[in-house]
Image: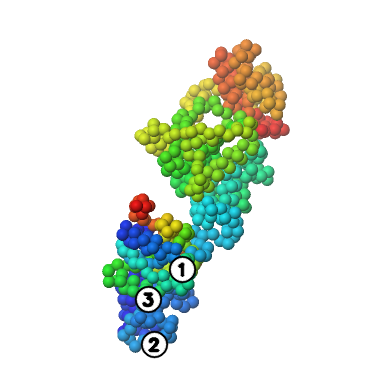
Amino acid sequence: MLEILDEPFQAMVSHAESTYPRECCGVMLGYQRDGRKVVTAAVPLNNSFAGEQNARYEINPADLLAADTEARERKLDLIGIFHSHPDCGAYFSSTDLENSCPWYSFVVLSIQGGRFHHANSFLPDLDQTRADQEELLLPENIGSRLAT
Amino acid sequence: MSKILIPTALRQFTAQLDQVPVSGATVGEALGDLTTQFPDLKKNLFTDQGRLRSFVNVYVNDEDIRYLDKEATKLEGSETLSIVPSIAGGSTTVAAGPLALSNDEIARYSRHLILPEVGMEGQLKLKAAKVALIGAGGLGAPVGLYLAAAGIGRIGLVDFDVVDASNLQRQVIHGTRDIGRKKLDSAADRMLDINPHLQVDKFDSGLTRENALGILGDYDLVIDGTDNFPTRYLVNDACVLLGKPNVYGSIFRFEGQATVFAYEDGPCYRCLYPEPPPPGLVPSCAEGGVLGILPGLIGVVQATEAVKIVLGAGETLKGRLLLYDALHMRFRELKLRRDPNCPVCGDRPTIRELIDYQEFCGLRPPVQATAAASPAITPREVKAKLDRGDRFMLIDVREPHEFQICRIPGGQLIPLGELPKRLAELDPNSEFVAYCKMGGRSQKAVDLLIQNGFRKVRNMTGGILAWSDQVDSSVPKY
């Protein structure tokens, strides 16, 4: 199970909404305990995909390396990657799967009409042939608070 | 010695070390040393063929080895190596994995996908949906067919019955060649033939107080295709306790009803019918008959409501009881409200767990009373009495149109409804045997006769259907 705390989740949503209608990406930092992963910080990264970004994202490995270094300095684990699907459901597409990595939780944020709609988390396998959905615990009442 | 920085996700394989000193003259040797020290890392970094996995990038200091000499890149012994996955993605292509449509599915559901109210997102919701269908009979047949076709991902089917010739007039999910098969198998075969992408979970049992919560708990919503009151109350109470919508339908002769119970703030079945009718007052379809087409329409209404609930589209029948009269082709609607005093879904519920529904519906009266009130005789014993030429009167208490279908030789027709008026025709000291289609109405006739002072009265168990089974198979079953 992946739990995202309030502050990082707001950061992820506002990053995804501000980059709409382009896809955004970033990393989630936190800690793991007893099979439970808790995200305590989110770090937005630059979408480095060269081309139309409305339906594609790419993380520059140098950025990911820097994020991993930042995690070390903050005594946190790099737990997962997030990206957005503008005007599209939060499913794990075949492009997502083929360019994924089994070491992280992958959170997909559905942004509909510029506003956060829903999110899912996925765990890709080693061979990038399937991704199982992971239980995702978001802060309570996100819908009502985001609306205000 | 060079060192390799270990990404957080891989530290579970390196005894939580965040960096590991390694020896080796090249990157390849250094990685080899790393996986020798920590063998569990190997499958995370290398394929079975020993190649670096496609998502693994290795940096020497801040340079990607892809732009150096790859794994042959030379090391002097003071470098810092980093393992960094390459990550990208995008929503353009069709989703993969459990929440995805294949090209076959896209072709299959194209008429849904171009509906804005369904679309890719809605179709994926249908695929992710888990629906429990109680009963593969009259209502379950159209529900099962259409839900399978619509692309519901998983359907849990609960039924313990066997296909009988008398089912085929309305249970269109079964065919003539299925007679004698389990309805569960016959229905699942047909549904999977319509849509091989479907997963059917088969529950070969009646729904009971013991298994209901366990079975229904796995599903998002429940469709009630049952034909009896105990199961209807059981499904209702289980849905309320589990917080699952109950898509309800019922049929009788030419009339049907449908609504959605226990959904959001709406009412439940008990808000509408707090108490079951007295046993025997409302005949079943087997006793009262049903227009074969009727469950088709009501079942399709149920399937429609189920799909709408999954999609979150439109307006459901929550709080509205749809009444349909096929004979006069009229639809009406009654408003329903949640009853704050409802024992199961009200403000202060008194039913917090499943109860004995047979007893609640009065179908399990004290044993002695039944035995005393309804002396019984089997069809074989009746045949023996007839063959011996015993003096007794065999009363057929069915309706005249049933009498036209088939009868037992020597049976005198006195429909149950006429019996009270015609008691004077009968001699209380004579011996009587009563029969009907299945034994229910004739039991009432026997009780009535006994109450009126008749001494030697018996009920033929199982009715003319049992007679056909046990005595004379040339008598048709209807």
Secondary structure beneath label 3: helix
Q: Position of residue A62 (x, y in %)?
A: 37, 76
Q: CA distance from mark 1 to mark 2?
A: 37 Å
Q: Which residue is mark 2?
A: B74
Nearer-the-camera pick, B22 or B195: B195
Q: Residues within 10 Å of mark 1 (few under 14, many from 20)?
A: some
Secondary structure beneath label 1: loop
* Residue A124 to residue B457: above or below: below
Contact between labelled residues 3 and 2, with CB atoms less than 8 Å apart: no
Q: Which residue is mark 3?
A: A62
Q: Position of residue A121 (x, y in %)?
A: 41, 60
Q: CA distance from mark 2 to mark 3?
A: 21 Å
Contact between labelled residues 1 and 3, with CB atoms less than 8 Å apart: no
Tell me if residue B160 can be seen: no
The disc label shown at residue A53, or none: 1
Please give the chain letter of the residue carrying mark 2.
B
Secondary structure beneath label 2: loop
